Image (spheres, rainbow, N blue to C red):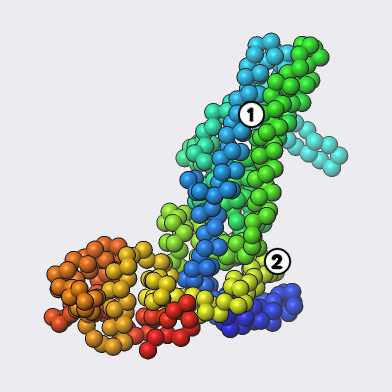
Amino acid sequence: MKQLEFAIRQYQETSPIRSGFDENSNSRLTVWYEEDLAPVLEDYSRRPRFRSYASWPITELQAGAKTELRSLIDQVDQYLVDCAQSVLEIFQVPSVYDALCSEHPPTQQVASGTWSSDDDSETVNEKDTLLCNPIEDHRMYLNYFASRPWEDLVNIQDYFGTQPKVSSVENGIAICWADTIVSLNPRLLPIGNFIVRSMLNRIRPSRKLFLDSKDLLVSIEKKLELRLWKKVEDVHRIYEVKFAELQQALKEIRKLPLIDACVALTQIYVATNDKADVEWLGLDTRTVKRGASEIKMRIRGLHGPEFHDRIATHLSRLQDLYDSEREAEIEFESQIALRSLALNSSERVVYWKGNPLNVSKKQFVLLHLLANSVKTKRTVIGNDLDAAESTSDSALSSLLDRLRKKIPMELATAIKHNGDGYYLDLSNNEVVVLNSERTNMPQS
C-alpha cells in the first residue's frame, strides 16, 4: 500500500495541471510512468482481488455466464430480434411497402463529384448521383437485425477497444462500419470498460431504427385506414423495458468505479509493459498485442493533461480495493503478488504466479510439504503424507504424476527427486506458506 500511496502522491507533485504543462512535463510524466506507476501495476496485477475486478466484464457478461446481467443481455437480444422480425413483417406487406414508397419516394443523391469555390459561391463541376430508396434501405436494415447475424451482443475481445467490424473489402482495404469507427475514437474514451460500451453500441442503432419505423408506419396509417404500429407496439414496449432494465442494472453494479479502475489500469499495464502477464483474462494473444499497441499510441497521441489525470484517478481508487478491517487479506494478496508460490495452510488455497491452482486435498498436502522443503532443505517421502497410512514410494510417485498434470509446467518441472526424496527446486524468496485465516505471519 505504501508504494501505491507514494505513486499517487508523486503524481500530485508532478501533475501537469499543478506544475503547468511546460516543456518538461512529458519528461516528468515518463519518469512517473516508469518509476512510480509501473511497479504498482506489476504488483496489483498479480493480486486475486484486483484480477477479479479487472476481469469482471468478461466473467459476468460473456456468453454462458450464470449471472443476472447475462440473463438480461440474453433477453434484450431475443426481444431485439423479435421486434425486428415483427416490424419487418409489416414492411414486407406489398400494400404497406408501396404506400411507404409513395409517401417517401426515392431521391437522387450525390455520390461523388468535384467542386470549386471562391469567396462568395461554390460551383459543382461534375457529379455522379445515385437513386436512393429510403424505404428499401430501411427494410434492409430491419432485415439485418431480424436475421441476427451477430454471434453475441458481448464480445470479450473488445477488452482493449471495440473490435472493427468489417462490412466489405475493397482493393485489399477493409471497410468498417461507421459506428465502429466512432466507438474507436480514442479522444472519446482512450481507456475504459470497452466491453460494456461496445455491447451498448451494438444495441442502440436498433432502438433508433424501431422509432423511425414507428414514424414511417404512422405516416401512412390514415391513408391505408389501418393501425399498423399497434400490431408491434407490445413487442417493442417489452424490448424497451428490457433494455432499460439492462441499463439500470449496469449503473447499479456494486463498486462500479473500482471495476472501471481495474479494467483501465490493466489496459495501461499491458500498454506500458512488454512482458505484462494477462493470461488470466483468457483473451486471444493477438487481441492483447493489438490492444497494447493501440493504447500505447493513444498515450503518445494525447498531449493534454486530461488523459494522465484519468489514469491517476483510477489509480487512487485502488485504495478502496480492500476493506480497511481485512489487513490479513491485504498481506496475503501482497505475498501472492511477491512470490511465485503462495499457500495458505488452513484455507487450503494455493497460488502460482498470481493464479489459483485447483488441486485435491491430498495434492495440496503434498504441495504444502514441498513448499516447506524449500526452507527446511528436507526431502519429502511417502510417510510424510500420512505416517499412519504408511504411503509407499510408488503411491507417492503416482500422486505426484497426477499433481503434475494439474499444475503449470514451470511448477511441475520444479519438483525434483535427488535419490532420497522429492524437493522443490525454488529459491526461498519465491515461496511463502501462511498460517490460518490468512494471517500476515509466515510460518517458520
Q: Please name whichever residue, 138 or 358, is drawn nearer the observer in this view of the structure.
A: 358
Q: Is residue 167 left or right of residue 350?
A: right
Between circles 1 and 2, the one closer to the viewer is: 1
Q: Which residue is mark 1?
A: 83
In the image, residue 329 lies at what x, y percent? 52, 76
User: Residue at the spot x=84%, y=42% of the render?
Assistant: 119
Give the structural element (helix, strand or loop) at label 2: helix
User: Residue at the spot x=54%, y=53% of the render?
Assistant: 60
Q: Amino acid at mark 1?
A: Cys
User: Residue at the spot x=55%, y=63% of the render?
Assistant: 53
Q: Residues within 10 Å of mark 1 (few under 14, many from 20)?
A: many
In the image, residue 418 lies at what x, y percent? 16, 81
Distance from the alpha carbon under mark 1 to that under mark 2: 41 Å
Q: Earlier in the sequence, mark 1 or mark 2?
A: 1
Q: Is residue 175 above or below residue 323?
A: above
* Residue 75 visible in the current orientation: yes
Q: Amino acid at mark 2?
A: Glu
Residue 306, numbered label: 2
In the image, residue 13 lies at what x, y percent? 69, 82
Residue extending furthest toward the front: 388
